[in-house]
Amino acid sequence: MSHLVYIPQDIEEEGKRFLVEKGFKIKVGSDLSQKILIEEIKGCDAVLTRSTAVINREVITAAENLKVIAKYGVGLDNIDIEAATERGIYVTNTPEANANSVAEHVMALILALSKNLSLADKELRSGNFAIRNQLFGMDLEGKTLGIIGLGRIGRILAKKASEGFDMKVIGYDPYVTARPNSELEIATDLEWVFRNADVISLHLPLTKTTKGIIGSREFSWMKTSSFFVNASRGGVVKEADLVNALQAGEIAGAGIDVFEVEPPDKWNPLFKLDNVIVSPHNAALTKEGSIRMAVHAAMQVEQVLSGVKPNWAVNEPLIKRLSM
């Protein structure tokens, strides 16, 4: 009997083709509402999900045959890992698929902020060529980049900033004490990093511990000439505090790829600020990165349904379901 893989939101053909070639049937979802997810997941052996589908306890309970929830991407805040673990279901992600894509996107935001590219583009399109005499950018060479969270993305970003732009890089991560590479210095005091960095880049998962961890206190530590970048999860930052810091001139600007509520309201106050550059949570979504995420997630499905422990499991199911 062929296993059935549920894909709530469509993915790249390469990922689906991998599953079909392994002999699995696939079912692409029709809607991301909880009612439809609960109905469509019934009878499925695996779910391969993007960030947009909320796989909570109710959805998981509806899938009596479910053995693996494979995340297309890294962040897991849309999946109830505890409920999956209790039911003996593996949860996996794709940590090696999009790290470079996100790091490149962050570097692009840093460059755009430091050179005032968004405002320069806006003014020139309105006929204001003289803006060139008012917008003076900042050289990155010799400046300090503070990276909060030293997972794969943070470490790749450190290398790009150090080797590519001659920046000094300091990192803060309570779980990292040893220096992971030569271009990165480890700091043990979060406040010190915020006070000394010219750019702060956030790379934290959204958990109960990290929710709203960055707010008015942290922004008050920053230099008035410094920039703040977040391409991790919007919920890690108190968005209203960020807006206040920007409006008050506590920081020079921000590059934001993620928001507290997604999709954000079109009246979001961040969108009205000229010193803010935004993108629609697409830092990971390059053509190459998207294909890697789809295939890597499909590989995790294939491993679990073949009775093999997956390479990128983020939990240890309480009830083993490897005999199928």
Image (spheres, rainbow, N blue to C red):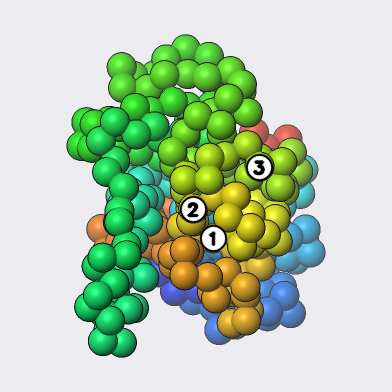
- Is 163 left or right of 292, judged from the image as shown? left
Q: Is residue 132 above or below residue 74?
A: below
Which amino acid lies under the numbered mark 2 shown in the image of this protein? Ala
- Asked which secondary structure carries label 3, the reply is helix
Q: Give the mark nearer the N terminus: 2 vs 3.
A: 3
**Residue 252: which disc?**
2
Which amino acid lies under the numbered mark 1 shown in the image of this protein? Val
- Is 31 left or right of 99, judged from the image as shown? right
In this orientation, does residue 3 appear? no
Of the residues tagged 1 and 3, which is closer to the observer?
Answer: 3
Check contact, mark 1 vs mark 3: CB within 8 A: no
Closer to us: 178 or 96: 178
> Residue at (76%, 49%) from the top-left corner?
83
The answer to which quarter of the image holds residue 194 is: top right
Q: Is residue 37 above or below residue 231?
A: below
- Asked which secondary structure carries label 1, the reply is loop
Q: Which residue is mark 1?
A: 258
Closer to us: 120 or 81: 120
Q: Position of residue 267 (x, y in %)?
A: 62, 81
Which amino acid lies under the numbered mark 3 shown in the image of this protein? Ser
Give the CA separation, mark 2 to mark 1.
Answer: 19 Å
- Asked which secondary structure carries label 2, the reply is loop
Q: Give the mark nearer the N terminus: 2 vs 1.
A: 2
How many marks do you count on the picture?
Answer: 3
In this orientation, does residue 134 appear? yes
The residue lying furthest to the top in this view is 178
Question: Alpha-carbon neighbours of circle 3 within 10 Å: few (<14), some, or many (≥20)?
Answer: some
Of the residues tagged 2 and 1, which is closer to the observer?
Answer: 2
**Residue 220: which disc?**
3
